[in-house]
Image (spheres, rainbow, N blue to C red):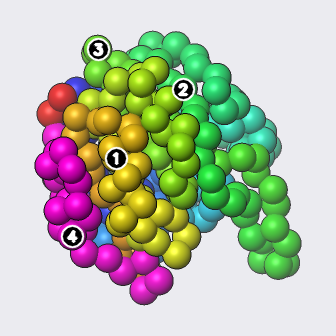
């Protein structure tokens, strides 16, 4: 399994002959190395419906016949736009041909703002456990710190966790370091930082806070083999 980071919260997993893309915010993302024209995902997994996570989902899914996995409300919204979807809810898991996906809770908001200044509610935000090839990757989505991260780590031993550190909208570095301890992941990678002025952070300072000394800063395009 090859797992790569592509700026903000964009994560790509290559496993079982499939390319899985998390939160494909590409257009307007000054930190990504990806282009909408070049990436060909078989599967897109969304943590929630904010624009910097929903991103280019509709275009990518239509052009590549990608399956989009998201919470039930967001999946319904996308299906109305001609996207092939699979809806789930927090706590639920489903076995796909590439592996198993389970949604966990996340403490954040969600919704899409239209040109008419209306906010469309798009279901509860989530974290995502992806289990394939005997490995488990956790994408926390956008979230604050919460105690049940201990239970997530105990129930599902995590090989690699992507945690937001930007503060303001999500956990900051200090809380994210505690989240890493709660989760007990073997490796931890920071995400959701430096894309906007409000979430400017030094990722290495977060790595230095980790008690397990098990963190790694990935530059856009860099990967980890599991």
Quarter in which the N terminus is drawn? top left
Give the answer, above or below, for where 178 lies relative to 82.
below
Name the residue tied to disc 4: 205
For disc 3, the neighbor class at 10 Å (few under 14, some 14 to 19, many from 20) is few
Name the residue tied to disc 2: 102
Q: Where is residue 65 in the image (x, y as percent from the top left)?
A: 53, 34
Labelled disc at residue 134: 3
For disc 1, the neighbor class at 10 Å (few under 14, some 14 to 19, many from 20) is many
Over which residues does the magenta segment extend?
A: 197-224
Q: Position of residue 28 (x, y in %)?
A: 46, 74
Residue shown at the point (50%, 24%) measured from the top left: 101
Name the residue tied to disc 1: 180
Q: What element carries label 1?
A: helix
Question: Which sits in the foreground, 212 or 188?
Answer: 212
Residue shown at the point (50%, 29%) measured from the top left: 151
Quarter in which the C terminus is drawn? top left
Labelled disc at residue 105: none
Q: 67 left or right of 125?
A: left
Which of the 4 quarters of the picture holds residue 92?
Answer: top right
Q: How many marks?
A: 4
The alpha-carbon separation of the residues under discs 2 and 4 comes to 30 Å
């Amino acid at each position: 399994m090859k797992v790569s980071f592509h700026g903000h919260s964009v994560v790509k997993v290559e496993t079982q002959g499939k390319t899985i893309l998390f939160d494909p915010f590409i257009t307007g993302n000054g930190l990504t190395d990806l282009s909408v024209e070049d990436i060909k995902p078989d599967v897109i997994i969304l943590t929630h419906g904010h624009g910097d996570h929903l991103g280019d989902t509709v275009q990518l899914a239509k052009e590549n016949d990608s399956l989009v996995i998201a919470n039930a409300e967001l999946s319904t919204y996308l299906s109305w736009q001609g996207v092939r979807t699979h809806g789930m809810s927090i706590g639920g898991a489903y076995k796909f041909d590439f592996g198993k996906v389970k949604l966990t809770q996340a403490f954040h908001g969600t919704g899409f703002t239209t040109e008419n200044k209306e906010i469309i509610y798009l279901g509860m935000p989530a974290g995502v456990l992806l289990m394939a090839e005997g490995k488990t990757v956790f994408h926390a989505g956008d979230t604050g710190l919460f105690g049940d991260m201990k239970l997530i780590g105990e129930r599902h031993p995590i090989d690699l966790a992507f945690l937001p550190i930007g503060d303001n909208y999500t956990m900051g570095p200090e809380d994210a370091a505690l989240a890493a301890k709660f989760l007990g992941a073997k490796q931890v990678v920071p995400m959701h930082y430096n894309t906007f002025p409000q979430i400017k952070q030094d990722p290495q300072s977060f790595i230095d806070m980790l008690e397990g000394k098990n963190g790694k800063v990935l530059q856009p395009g860099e990967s980890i083999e599991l």
